[in-house]
Image: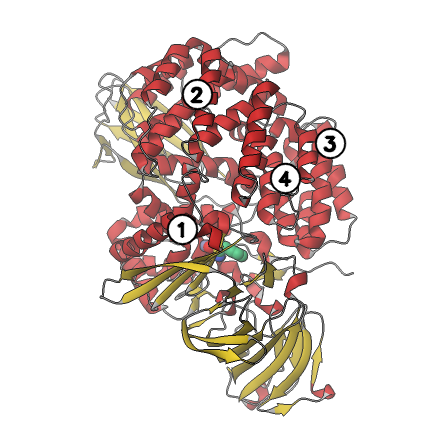
């Protein structure tokens, strides 16, 4: 087999033919579905000499018939290979008819048309439509669709596709059909079809211009009681997009369908969003607060795509962040407006700095707009999504909200119905603001995380504060030279006497107490004048740019900022930095075999947090949360998993011992038996209470053990139950872990999404027996390698979150992951290529582990690989 070849952004060419209208007819059967397609085609060029052959994509299709303008083609008039159908000569404007057969029941890749629990569903982004029929499968070919779905009336009573149902009826042999019409031209990646035995909940929404929209959520019957939150979230999202971006929904019907087997979170198919059931179903007894918030965010995200993605789409897949970065920014803003804004930012940034920074520093690092790829489905990454969102956020901040909104209005109106590029988007921002964004464009083309070294000093005699910023972006695999970026740095200078933000003047210009300065050069000096008292700088407020910023803060400075910074995000970050300094010392002590001593300044800071009356309890819960092992690892030159685990555990236990009564009081004060609602106040209380309990359980305090068991048994809501079960499972006492796990597993055996949680909780257990448990759980009847949620819950969680055990020095954790990747490579290449990520980060570890990890990657490489896994493994071993 020849090695898969990359495709390049600079090779982009307009399509030779456009499809103006697509007619599809599906005759559904698990083993042999017939797909009849009629494409209305037109050559772009009017010139006869440009009469290029028509090349259509198609994979895993059995071609039964091909005709042009009703004339069946003979053998010499076309050719078919594993990836294309080529017709040598075609007229200027014509109808192409094809008929193919496909086998949904053997589709384990979950791309194209497949079966999930007996229900037919599709996933076409990015290149799944070519597994359904022969088509120019690229986003810059946009057509209106008319789709007839035929199926067995008894087993498939519900037949759905994009747009509006226009006709339905009975057919012989117990079959029936529905015809759907979607009047909005769309690329085929937004096509969707669902057929199954589903039930719906229905609601309505009146749009800002007074149009009445029917909203439906389709689920399996037993899940009808788990749709309220998704429906409420959808209505809030529709209203928010009208109020915030002036965007109105455009069809009479909006549908969401929940499916159990799905590679990603959800998909924005026009008028028919298809969701991983984990991203839509919630119930107080089965879903945690975090799950409720995730559902709200994903429902909003997919809905927002109706404009940012569907009405205005991407010219090619290199532009993926055009829709994803922008839409993530939109959903983050929505969630911030609906819940606690500072907590949303803290959560997003702490995830970003852990996971995206690691991606940007690893072998698969790529720019927000990649310039080449082998397999596009490997590029649904944190860089495209989350870093892309940070870049849009910087644009919003550079322009200010009003100009930014003018820019989005211009973008949506100018490019409605078109497939466009990132230049088109940024061009609108430039046009409405007059700002020069040319240097800013490098954020899209340059991979890697910029590092800023900041230094400052206060000149008493002149009442000046001097700040020096130096930027550098480390080399990434295919980019050795890096340009300086345009980096907006929001900052304040906090007076050490007053504790207040000081008025800042820069180059004679008054900036106010909180301002943005622009770093454009490799190194720049900023002199703030009229600074009456010595300040501590509060830099990169709100994480104003996706960079690593170092400043030689003393521990007193950080304790001071933790109390006084007016920016909630930086107050939290000061606490994280303070904890990191203490953790660094303890990691060193552990490595050197020296006795560990807890830094009293951290204890004092925590005592102040616990006893002061902080009004934002959600932020407080975040402040009390220590940096995760993964985040700590990101800060180390060579990751020492055992030292990190030991140091973090030591800090946690020391705090618990020193502040036992304070934690106990916080727990007691936030107990409540009001009926569950996923609203910010309650969520904050639960978070705070459960953080306190986790400290107390780290020392297996007797009273805490009793409280945890009570909380587990009270079964009030999944947030509290899961928190308690996790603590019991993580304790060293199997008399606590085993009975609770057993009870929970039996109680929820019928609920697949709860079983996913049961799997995850067990494999995050720090004790060394976890690998045996994991192997045992892989044989559990509820587990299946064919279900991505199960793979993520069990294998993904273990490899990414149980760091001490995944990185066991005997290499067993690595071996287990490689075995799974080899199996999944055959079943579901997309999931295989994702789940492998922790192995690709071998450069970060000691030599012994490096060798073990590389050996597993080599073992994988020796297999016959899908392009997906091939691309990742090649990069990892390059
Ligand atoms: N476009 C989807 C989203 O982010 C993600 C997705 C990509 C889903 C590819 C399935 C396949 O909203
Ligand atoms: Zn998206």
What element does badge 4 sit on? helix
What element does badge 2 sit on? helix
Kindly report the distance in space between the C-alpha atoms of the residues bearing marks 2 and 3. 33 Å
Q: Is residue 262 visible?
A: yes
Kindly report the distance in space between the C-alpha atoms of the residues bearing marks 3 and 1. 41 Å
Kindly report the distance in space between the C-alpha atoms of the residues bearing marks 1 and 4. 28 Å
Sequence-first disc among 2 and 3 = 2
The residue that disc 1 covers is 227
Indicate which quadrant contains ligand 2. bottom left
Q: Is mark 1 within 8 Å of ligand 1?
A: no
The residue that disc 3 covers is 812
Q: In terms of image quadrants, where is residue 839? A: top right
Q: For the residue carrying disc 4, how many other residues have a C-alpha within 10 Å: few (<14), some (14-19), or many (20+)?
A: many
Q: In the rendered view, would you say 13 is above or below 592?
A: below
Give the image location of residue 199, x and y in percent.
45, 59
Sequence-first disc among 2 and 4 = 2
Give the image location of residue 501, x and y in percent.
24, 27
- In the shown orientation, is residue 417 left or right of residue 746? left
Q: Which mark is residue 693?
A: 2
Kindly report the distance in space between the C-alpha atoms of the residues bearing marks 4 and 3. 13 Å
Tag 4–tag 3 contact (CB < 8 Å):
no
Sequence-first disc among 3 and 1 = 1
Sequence-first disc among 4 and 3 = 4
- Residue sitting at 22 percent across and 18 percent down? 498
């Amino acid at each position: 087999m020849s090695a898969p070849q990359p495709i390049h952004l600079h090779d982009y060419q307009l399509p030779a033919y456009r499809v103006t209208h697509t007619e599809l007819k599906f005759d559904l059967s698990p083993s042999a579905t017939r797909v009849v397609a009629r494409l209305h085609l037109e050559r772009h060029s009017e010139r006869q000499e440009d009469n290029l052959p028509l090349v259509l994509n198609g994979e895993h299709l059995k071609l039964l018939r091909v005709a042009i303008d009703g004339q069946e083609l003979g053998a010499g008039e076309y050719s078919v290979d594993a990836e294309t159908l080529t017709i040598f000569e075609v007229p200027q404007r014509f109808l192409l008819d094809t008929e193919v057969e496909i086998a949904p029941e053997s589709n384990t890749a979950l791309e194209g048309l497949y079966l999930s629990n007996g229900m037919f569903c599709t996933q076409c982004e990015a290149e799944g439509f070519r597994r359904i029929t022969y088509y120019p499968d690229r986003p810059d070919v946009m057509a209106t669709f008319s789709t007839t779905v035929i199926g067995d009336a008894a087993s498939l009573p519900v037949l759905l596709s994009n747009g509006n149902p226009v006709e339905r009826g009975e057919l012989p042999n117990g079959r029936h059909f529905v015809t759907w019409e979607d009047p909005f031209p769309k690329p085929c990646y937004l096509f969707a079809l669902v057929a199954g035995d589903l039930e719906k909940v229905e609601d309505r929404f009146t749009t800002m211009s007074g149009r009445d929209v029917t909203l439906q959520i389709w689920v399996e019957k037993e899940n009808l009681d788990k749709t309220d939150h998704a429906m409420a979230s959808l209505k809030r999202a529709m209203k928010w997009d009208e109020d915030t971006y002036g965007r109105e929904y455009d069809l009479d019907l909006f549908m969401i369908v929940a499916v159990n087997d799905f590679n990603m979170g959800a998909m924005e198919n026009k008028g028919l969003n298809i969701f991983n059931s984990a991203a839509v179903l919630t119930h107080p007894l089965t879903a945690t607060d975090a799950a409720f918030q995730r559902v709200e965010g994903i429902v909003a995200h997919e809905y927002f795509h109706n404009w940012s993605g569907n009405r205005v789409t991407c010219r090619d897949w290199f532009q993926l962040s055009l829709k994803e970065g922008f839409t993530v920014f939109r959903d983050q803003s929505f969630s911030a407006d609906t819940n606690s804004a500072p907590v949303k930012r803290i959560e997003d940034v702490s995830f970003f700095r852990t996971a995206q920074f690691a991606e940007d520093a690893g072998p698969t690092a790529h720019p927000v707009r990649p310039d080449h790829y082998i397999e596009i489905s490997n590029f649904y990454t944190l860089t495209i999504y989350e870093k892309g969102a940070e870049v849009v956020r910087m644009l919003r901040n550079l322009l200010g909200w009003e100009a930014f909104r003018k820019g989005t209005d211009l973008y949506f109106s100018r490019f409605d119905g078109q497939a466009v590029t990132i230049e088109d988007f940024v061009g609108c921002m430039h046009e409405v603001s007059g700002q020069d964004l040319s240097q800013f464009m490098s954020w899209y083309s340059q991979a890697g995380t910029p590092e800023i070294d900041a230094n400052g000093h206060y000149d008493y005699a002149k009442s000046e504060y001097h700040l020096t910023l130096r930027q550098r972006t480390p080399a990434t695999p295919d980019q050795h030279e890096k340009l300086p970026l345009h980096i907006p740095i929001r900052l304040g200078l906090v007076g050490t006497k007053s504790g207040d933000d000081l008025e800042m003047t820069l180059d004679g210009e008054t900036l106010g107490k909180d301002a943005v300065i622009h770093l454009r050069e490799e190194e720049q000096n900023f002199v703030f004048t009229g600074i009456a008292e010595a300040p501590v700088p509060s830099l990169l407020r709100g994480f104003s740019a996706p960079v690593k910023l170092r400043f030689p803060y003393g521990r007193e400075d950080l304790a001071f900022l933790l109390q006084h910074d007016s920016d909630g995000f930086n107050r939290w970050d000061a606490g994280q930095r303070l904890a990191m300094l203490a953790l660094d010392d303890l990691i060193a002590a552990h490595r050197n075999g020296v006795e560990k001593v807890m830094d009293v300044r951290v204890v004092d800071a925590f005592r102040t947090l616990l006893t002061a009356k902080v009004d934002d309890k959600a932020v407080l819960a975040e402040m009390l949360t220590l940096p995760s092992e993964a985040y700590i690892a990101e800060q180390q030159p060579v990751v020492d998993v055992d030292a990190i685990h030991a140091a973090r555990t030591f800090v946690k236990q020391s705090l618990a011992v020193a502040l036992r009564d304070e934690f106990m009081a916080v727990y007691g004060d936030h107990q409540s038996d009001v009926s569950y609602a996923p609203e910010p106040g309650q969520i904050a209380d639960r978070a705070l209470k459960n953080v306190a309990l986790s400290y107390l359980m780290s020392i297996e305090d007797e009273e805490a053990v009793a409280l945890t068991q009570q909380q587990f048994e009270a079964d009030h809501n999944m947030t509290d139950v899961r928190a308690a079960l996790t603590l019991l499972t993580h304790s060293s006492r199997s008399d606590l872990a085993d009975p609770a796990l057993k009870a929970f597993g039996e109680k929820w055996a019928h609920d697949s999404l709860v079983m996913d949680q049961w799997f995850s909780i067990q494999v995050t257990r720090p004790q060394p027996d976890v690998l045996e448990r994991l192997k045992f759980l892989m044989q559990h009847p509820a587990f299946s390698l064919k279900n991505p949620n199960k793979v993520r819950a069990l294998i993904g969680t273990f490899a990414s979150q149980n760091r001490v055990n995944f990185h066991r020095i005997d290499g067993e954790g690595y071996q287990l992951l490689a075995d799974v990747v080899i199996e999944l490579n055959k079943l579901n290449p997309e999931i295989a290529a994702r789940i492998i990520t922790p192995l690709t980060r071998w450069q970060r570890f000691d030599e012994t582990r490096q060798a073990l990890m590389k050996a597993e990657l080599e073992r994988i490489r020796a297999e016959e690989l899908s392009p997906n896994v091939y691309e990742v493994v090649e990069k990892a071993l390059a």
